Image (spheres, rainbow, N blue to C red):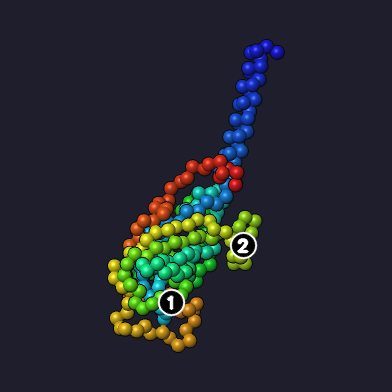
């Protein structure tokens, strides 16, 4: 075999390996890449007491982006709210809905179940968040830190309600909420309906005000260039 033949053979092998690698990478990116979620909240949230309770609630516009090749299922959004005095309470996602700009009202569609985020797309929705426990009355003005975590099914597990026990953290979001004034009722007391079950109480908030979102991480939904770790997932 001459030097020219050996060089040609080497170039052919390199070209073949490159072609196979490109094919495998393209197949992975187009059909096999696992869901990769990113959550972003709007610049303002509407806050107030959840009807019939002393729980603080928020109506939040959110964008969920999926940079994977497979549809993503959001099972739960939960986290913590840290008050200006550094005390922390749990926060949970309790409803989904729409915002009626004409009426200036959030219109809930029902209790939380799941959200589907199609591959290579972003989903915009309004969600309701609430504290898991009562807050001292009134809720003082100041800067609050909200940290949220999105849970999705583990690989190979069914994504329905029974699959919630097999969930995994998929993405997170952290930001600061600024309440310009105390969240309070017009009177000195909140009317609590006797024997009211919070899970069956109204969806709406009372005496709402806007809470400005600052210092959010991530700040926007952008496409991420996959690295080696992503390719080996």
Mark 2 residue element:
helix
Task: Please state the horizontal and vertical placement of residue 95, each as a whole percent of the image.
Answer: 47, 69
In the image, taking residue 207 as reference, residue 168 lies left or right, namely right
Q: Residue at x 44, y 61 (%)?
A: 147
Q: Residues within 10 Å of mark 1 (few under 14, many from 20)?
A: few
What number is the disc on residue 77? none
Relative to the observer, which residue lies in front, 110 or 186?
186
Picture quarter with the N terminus: top right
Q: Which residue sits furthest top?
A: 2
Residue under the point 34% across and 64% down = 143
Residue 173 appears at what percent x and percent y? 44, 57
Mark whose residue sits in front, 2 or 1:
1
Q: Is residue 100 visible?
A: no
Classify 10 Å Cα crowding around label 2: few (below 14), some (14-19), many (20 and above).
some
Residue 167 quadrant: bottom right
Which residue is identified by label 1? 134
| Of residues 32 and 84, the one drawn nearer to the viewer in this rendering | 84
Position of 134 relative to 18 (above/below): below
Q: Which residue is mark 2?
A: 166
Lower position in the chain sequence, tag 2 or tag 1: 1
Residue 96 higher or lower than 230, as above or below: below
Residue 171 seen in this snapshot = yes
The residue that appears at 43% across and 86% down in the rendered structure is 193
SS class, disc 1:
loop
Please state the horizontal and vertical placement of residue 93, each as a whole percent of the image. Answer: 47, 67
For the point 57% across and 59% down, the residue is 168
Report, in whole angstroms, how far the alpha carbon at label 2 lies from the one at label 1: 29 Å
User: How many numbered discs, if any?
Assistant: 2
Question: Residue 120, percent across and down?
Answer: 50, 49
Relative vertical location of residue 221 with respect to residue 18 in this rendering, above or below: below
- Up the image or down, 48 lies above or below 33; here it is below
């Amino acid at each position: 075999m001459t030097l020219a033949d050996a060089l040609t053979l080497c170039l052919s092998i390199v070209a073949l390996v490159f072609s196979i690698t490109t094919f495998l990478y393209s197949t992975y990116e187009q059909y096999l890449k696992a869901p990769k979620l990113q959550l972003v909240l709007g610049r303002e949230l509407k806050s107030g007491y959840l009807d019939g309770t002393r729980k603080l609630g928020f109506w939040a516009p959110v964008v969920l982006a999926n940079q994977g090749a497979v549809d993503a299922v959001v099972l739960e959004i939960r986290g913590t709210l840290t008050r200006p005095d550094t005390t922390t309470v749990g926060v949970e996602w309790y409803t989904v809905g729409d915002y009626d700009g004409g009426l200036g009202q959030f219109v809930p569609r029902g209790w939380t179940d799941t959200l589907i985020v199609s591959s290579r797309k972003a989903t915009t929705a309004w969600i309701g968040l609430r504290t898991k426990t009562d807050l001292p009355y009134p809720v003082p003005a100041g800067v609050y830190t909200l940290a949220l975590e999105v849970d999705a099914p583990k690989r190979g597990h069914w994504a329905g309600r029974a699959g919630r026990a097999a969930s995994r953290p998929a993405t997170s979001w952290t930001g600061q909420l600024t309440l310009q004034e105390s969240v309070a009722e017009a009177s000195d007391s909140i009317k609590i309906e006797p024997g009211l079950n919070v899970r069956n109480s109204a969806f709406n908030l009372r005496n709402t005000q806007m809470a400005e979102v600052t210092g959010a991480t991530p700040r926007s939904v952008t496409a991420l260039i996959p690295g080696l770790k992503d390719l080996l997932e």
